Every structure is written in C-alpha cells, then in structure tokens.
Image (cartoon, coloured by chain):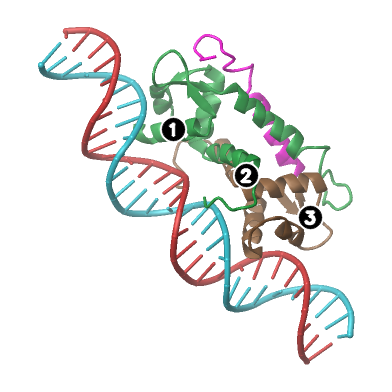
Chain colours: A brown, B green, C red, D cyan
Amino acid sequence: MKAIEGLTAEEERAAAIFRALGNPARVRIVAELARRRACVTNDLVSMLPLAQSTVSQHIKVLKDAGIIRGSTEAEGCYCLDPEVMRWLATFAYDICCPDDACDGGPGCAP
Amino acid sequence: MKAIEGLTAEEERAAAIFRALGNPARVRIVAELARRRACVTNDLVSMLPLAQSTVSQHIKVLKDAGIIRGSTEAEGCYCLDPEVMRWLATFAYDICCPDDACDGGPGCAP
DNA sequence: GCCCATCATCGTAATTTTGCGATATCGCAT
DNA sequence: ATGCGATATCGCAAAATTACGATGATGGGC
C-alpha cells in the first residue's frame, strides 16, 4: 500500500480494518472469537486447514488492525476488541445504508 | 488467493466483500455512492488523487465483488447494491457482536 | 537439568494487488 | 467522416499478501 496523498486517515483506518477481514481464514477466526469470547492459538489452528505458523500470521494481521487483542488469561489467548466491532456495525449501518440507498429509485436499476 | 480446502463458501464470500472494501480509495467510492445514490466515473475520478485508469480498476473490483452495479441511466453510472449493504450490516451486527462479546467479562482484558 | 507443548518470528517462493501510461471503444456533436 | 470527451482494458513494474517449513523463545512437568 503506497499511502496516496489526499485520502483521509479515517478512510485509511476503515480500509485497514476491512483488509484485515478480507481473508476467509481470518473471517473464521473472528467468527469463532465472537462465538467463544476467547480462544488460544491452538484452538484456532486445529479449526483451520492451515499450518500453525500461518494461523499465527493471520492472528498478527488481525491484532495489528486492532480487531483482536490478547486477553488477560495468558499469552496466545485472544478476544475481539468490542470498540472496533461497534465501529464496524456503525459503518455498515449508516455509511453504507444512509437512507436505503439504491432502493430502485430514480437513477438505480431495480 | 489459493482457495484453501476446508473453508466454506460463505466465508469466502464474506472475505471477498471485505477485501473489496480494503482500500481507502474504494472506501471513499462506496461512501460517496452512499451519499449521492449514483455517480458517473468522472465524478469519482475528480474526487480521488488517482489516474482515471486506476479509478476504473477500483470500480471494477467493487463491481466484481457485487458491491456496486451499473445503474440504468447510462454506462459508467454506478450505485450500491442494497442487498450486499444489508448483508454487511447484518454480518457486523450479529456475527461480530453476537451478545456484547468481549465486554471485559471473564477471559477478556478490560 | 532436560524434554515437551505452545506460540511467535524469520526466510522464502508463489501469487495477488496497486497504480500508471498507453491504447482501445463508444456515443455524440460538428 | 472526423474529432472529442468519457470509459474500459491491456501490459507492466513495484509492492504486498499468503502459505510454508525451519527456527527461536517460553513455561511447565519430570
């Protein structure tokens, strides 16, 4: 990513979060963390058809994006960051669907 | 993307949508389409610090992901797909925030 | 001490993404 | 027909992502 001038920090932040979610393995990790509240790395490794090092990399990507973070329980124990999750829900709701955009009205195909 | 065995089609689909949103220029395009309901390519080009061909590429990525589509007005006139937007809001709300996951309760840092 | 399990990081190869200029294509006015 | 404005697509180089095995690091039993 070359960090083009003229794009806002907020847009960069949003894109970073989406990009971190843009991989099926990471989608599964996030969904599982949502379901279980907290997982150790090994739980996630045995859940995915990937090598341990690869899963660890995916965890790092999610952590760097601020989507997950370590729990207090132990090293290698993760949970979702509630603030980011709320941000995502808000973005989806009012940035993408401000007032039923593209509902087949004038200018949009049905 | 190597299409690893063992990940569901739904996870792949979700990841594809997130990946398409994982670029600040595309975030801006989507936000602008949400605000304006429909844009021609040139509106988006003059809004972004990028070459016309690059913007056209970003539009293609969003279109391939099913996030935007052509309106009936003319070629090169786009709007958001309401179904995908609703899917995104739903995903964020009940997959990522099933019941206030990671609210500082046991197993999670505050 | 010494192994074992668990996890992170390094190094690498293959693939994908990104952005650009150049080059079609298409509709419309002259 | 000719030219023009608006888009899409092609080809390319640079950068990023993805996955893996190998290699550290750490903590707990024996």
* Residue A26 percent coordinates (x, y): 65, 49
Q: Amino acid at mark 2?
A: Leu
Q: Which residue is mark 3?
A: A39
Tell me: B56 left or right of B65.
Answer: left
- Name which residue lies at 40% across and 24% down: B41
Q: B46 and A60: which one is in front?
A: A60
* Residue B49 percent coordinates (x, y): 41, 34
Within-10-Å neighbours for mark 1: few <14, some 14–19, many 20+? some
Q: In the orientation shown, which residue stands out farthest toward the front? A: B5
SS state under label 2: loop
Q: Looking at the image, is D30 positioned above or below residue A72?
A: below
Q: Amino acid at mark 1?
A: Lys
| Disc 3: host chain | A
* Residue D7 percent coordinates (x, y): 36, 25
Q: Which mark is residue B60?
A: 1
Q: A50 and B61: which one is in front?
A: A50
- In this rendering, does residue B1 appear at all? yes
- Name which residue lies at 62% across and 24% down: B83
- What whole-number distance in Å separates the C-alpha atoms at marks 3 and 2? 18 Å
User: What is the magenta range?
Assistant: A81-110
Q: Which residue is mark 2?
A: A21
SS state under label 1: helix
